[in-house]
Image (cartoon, rainbow, N blue to C red):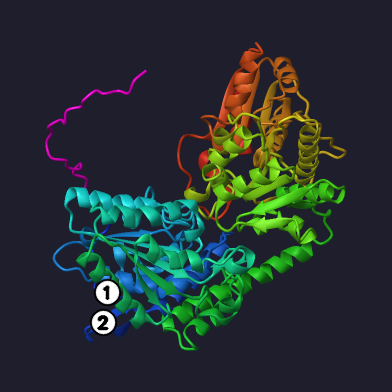
Amino acid sequence: MGADTTVVQAVEAPPLKPLALRSRLAGTPSPSPKYSVTVRNRAGQPVVLADPRATRALVALMNIHAVNGGAACHWGGPAAFAEINAALHGIMFAVQGRPWHAAYNYVNDAGHAENGIYALRALYGFDGMTFEDLKGFRSLQSKLTGHGESHLNPEGVLLSNGPLSSAIGQAEGLAMADKLAGNDRVTLCVASDGASMEGEAREAYASIPGLAAKGRLNPFVLVISDNDTKLSGRISKDAFSMQPSLEAMAVLGWNVLKVANGHDLEAVYQAMEAAMEAARANPKQPVCVWVKTIKGYGVKATMENAAGGHGFPLNNAEKIVDFVNEIYGGQPPEEFARWAAVLRADWEQKEAAKKAKAAAAASAAPAVKKDKVQSGLAKAAVKAATEGLPVFSVSSDVQGSTGMSLFQKSFPDRWVEVGIAEANMVSVAAGLSKLGFIAIADTFGQFGITKGNLPLTMAALSQAPVIAVFSHIGLQDAADGASHQATTYFAATCAIPHTVVIAPSCSDEAEALMYEAIRRQAADRLAGKDGESYVFFVGRENYPLRWVEGAAYPWGKAQVLREGKDVVLISCGVLVEKAIAAGQKLAEQGIQATVINNPFINRVDVETIGAAVQRCGGRVVTLEDHQVVGGMGALVAHALTCAGIPHRMKSLGIPGEFGRSAYVAEHLYQHYGLTAERMAQAARELLA
């Protein structure tokens, strides 16, 4: 057929105007922060800015409240960004004649530094925020979530952040929208050298100057904090140097301004002034301010730490007084000193009570031994490699959290870290697989299913199956909030052809199934078959090593943990423990439940589950920390229906909502009704 030669006439339409949306951001706060310092601007005039030391002290103090609640926190990132954000906010909040957000779009892509922004804005009283509000950081009751979330805090967060680089492209869209709408506004985006490793960032780094040169964007300023540090250590040591990539920003078309000392507040402020002036003077060339910083700045131990004190280095309040004193060189403001002293005194009192309780319980029965589920996955990989199988580990920074660091320490020449780049990680694993290696990729579940989803599909399509270890799934990454909570992990992966999705519930089960997965993949490849990818989803908390003594874990089979005749309770992964507890509660009420652990999510064991459902009159309750839509319960119901097995089901899961921060996952399980009590209640309702 010939080419289509249809002539399309331009359509006359009214001028393009955006919908008249009202900004939900809070207005410009008081011009004077509670604790301030004075610097000189480029014209030599005095400018009052928030004291970065106060920001750091507030971060440390608010973190202790979260730690007391059981949450993890970040210190290194906000400490590194303190001067950058003090300068930017000083400029933004000095706007006259209109709200600050009418003059600037402020986008924080450095989600780990969000608590530093909360602390800084509390110094200004932004949105009515007080130091008391900071004490609720990361709790279920607070909108000060682990990372900035606009769905919970629209007054303070323009674009949600968390997964590195996810906000940079959105910031580009803001600048384009302002250009289309004719708004007089500059877009400011702060990011890190770690975020600059992500594919999304690199795409935006090329397209922003490319489109700006064509007159498609409003003035754009990108600020990159460069400290060669990520979660697990130094970027250049563990992965590769980012310096050539950052040097290439000028080649891509950015006007690059360098700041040699990112903790010289006056130098940083003047650089930000110059950047905004240059961006306004020539919107066709965006400005990149390349700032050398030190992660964990302000405390010697974290400044010297390989990971820069990425997480908060104090796991209790024992040393908080010394920590705050060091930030200030020995003379913190009186209210900070009192705050720290109260936190330490409260800790000492609780420690004394804890020791007394432990002494009283010393003669009690020994506790059940527990471990993280992912430890079993790493043990299996070590075992298979020791037996001669060509297992190779590919990581993207978080191997210490996923558990794969055990394998890497056992076999120092059998792993690589590709940097903070999950999509590339999965694709590299596929390339290794294609030439005969058993490649295991690991990251957090949310990043694996979002950034790694297309590479997982392409791995299967290329007959290059991989094994994935995706941890911190569901609501288990409680404190980090919605951006880190993989609540669509089954729905995102179960339909990928030639891919088996597995959710082990304990370390022993994980070890047995991972070992078998490695052996099966090797056998298939040697037999000339394409083989299947195996995706293991695990949580982050500790669970018993096994649920029943002498347990076996046959491939492809569901595990019956309790026999009953009245109702079937089915769960998987991190919530199996609650299904067991629900079965016990029902037994106390004279109701006999069959409790089933269902690890093979998209390969439903209809033989085992179907027989149990038939014995129990078709009554089924499923429980998972996944969205109800597309979850484990939905797949079980579909499998039973296709097998012609009548059933009535109640599925307990997340009801089509994003998660939020909480100190611990249990708070979120209670919030969403993912509990043993609710499961038992659902069973009683089926029996009524």
Q: Of marks 1 and 2, which one's residue comes earlier in the chain? A: 2
Q: Where does residue 330 sit, x and y in percent of width and height?
A: 50, 88
Mark 1 residue element:
helix
Give the CA distance from mark 1 to mark 2.
8 Å
The part of the chain drawn in magenta is 1-22
What's the mark number on residue 41?
A: 2
Q: Quadrant of residue 503?
A: top right
Q: Residue at x 49, y 82 (%)?
A: 327
Q: Is residue 13 magenta?
A: yes
Q: Where does residue 335 sit, x and y in percent of width and height?
A: 42, 79
Q: Residue at x 73, y 25 (%)?
A: 592
Looking at the picture, which amino acid does disc 2 mark? Asn
Mark 2 residue element:
loop
Q: Quadrant of the N terminus?
A: top left
What's the mark number on residue 273?
A: 1
- In-front residue for pair 305/651: 305
Looking at the picture, which amino acid does disc 1 mark? Glu
Q: Where does residue 627 sit, x and y in percent of width and height?
A: 52, 35
